[in-house]
Structure formats: C-alpha cells, structure tokens
Image: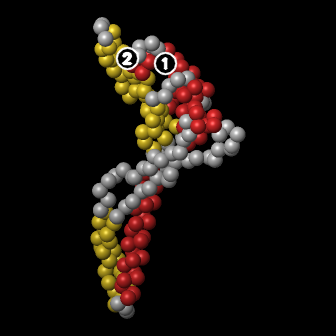
Amino acid sequence: EIYLSIRLDESDTKGRLPIEEQRRKMFSALKKAGVDAEKQLSVQGMSSEFFRRRQSLLATQYELRLESAAAVRKVFDELDKAGITNVNVTRTSSSKIDEYRKEARQQAIRNAQSRAREVAEAIGQTIGACYEISDYTTSTQPVYRKNMLMATSAAMDAVAQEAEPEVQFEQIEINYTVSAKFYLNTK
C-alpha cells in the first residue's frame, strides 16, 4: 500500500483556477489512471486563507491509497497532465503487516534459541526449556523506506524512445530484538 498526498490550492494558481475546477480535473485524472476515488481517496483537510482584499483562497488536502508503484506512476502522470503537481508519497504500508510482524518476532526467538544452543554446546551442555522471554522492540511501527525512482514527465519525454524498467518501492524492513533465557542441562 502506497499513500499519496494530493493538495489542491487556489493560491498555486494565484486564484485564477477555482478549487472546484481543480477537483474536477483531479477526479478526471484519477479516473483515467484507473483509481476508484470513492474507495481509495479521502479528504485529509480543508483550509481557507485571506488573499488581498476580501478574497479568500481555498485549499484541500487528499490522501490516496494505491496498491503498486506502477499505479503510483500512472497517477503521477495523469495528475501532471491535468496540471496538478502538488503530489507526494507520504507513507507506505502493507495489508499483511501484522502477519509480517508475527513472522519477524517468531524468527527472532528461533534465532535466540539457536544461539543459546551454540553457546551451551561450547561448554558441553545443552539447553532446556525457555523460562523467560523479553521483547526489547520499542517501536511498534516497522521502518519504511520510501525511495522511489520516478522520472518527471519532462524527463520521460527526453527518453521516450528507451524502454523504462519497472520501478518498485524497496522492501519493508521489520526488526525485532528479543532476549530468551533457557535452563542448561548437563550431558
């Protein structure tokens, strides 16, 4: 899951393009990109700022959830064609994040058991039952990397003849630190 922030702001056009027109262009561009706006788009905030005399300029912040880097690329391209350029990747996630966390935690305790077994064998003993497990992971959020190589439309036009590689977001990295204490058995 990749989340984009889309900001429509009348001050970007110095009040010449009303927010309603920007919204229409955004929805049209999202539709061309294959986005179901009702399911994938949410309003994050709205504001109004005074500009010059008795005129206010409106702004609206949206969050768009996409499923792949290819979808992000398509949305960026369509929004750029519509003149909407205030778009950013804000965060990435996975619908299976709880499953990945569980797997990482289980692997961490298996590693602790394996290391305990190696150390015990070095002194001629074996490990018995585990009597204490401590989880030292302080963050409940995994580390997300948002490095995505994305060319602008101008750069794409310059290399239109060359085939572009499929660019993906980096893998989600989840770290767990556990400590386990085992009984020692003599041989």
- Frontmost residue, 114 versus 15: 15
Question: Which residue position holds label 2?
Answer: 58
Quarter of the image for residue 160 reads top right
Residue that lies at the very extreme toward the right in this rendered image: 161
Q: Please say whether residue 64 is visible from this viewpoint.
A: yes
| Dots 1, 2 in contact, CB < 8 A | no
Q: Amino acid at mark 2?
A: Leu
Residue drawn at x 34%, y 86% as measured from the top left: 185
Question: Which residue position holds label 1?
Answer: 22
Q: Which numbered disc covers residue 85? A: none
Q: Is residue 175 above or below residue 126?
A: above
Mark 1–mark 2 distance (CA, rounded to whole Å): 11 Å
- What kind of colouring is applied to the model shown? secondary structure
Where residue 112 appears, as percent x and y from the top left, is: 38, 72
- Quadrant where the C terminus lies? bottom left
Nearer-N-terminus badge (1/2): 1
- Frontmost residue, 69 versus 185: 69
Q: Is residue 60 above or below residue 16?
A: below
Quarter of the image for residue 161 reads top right
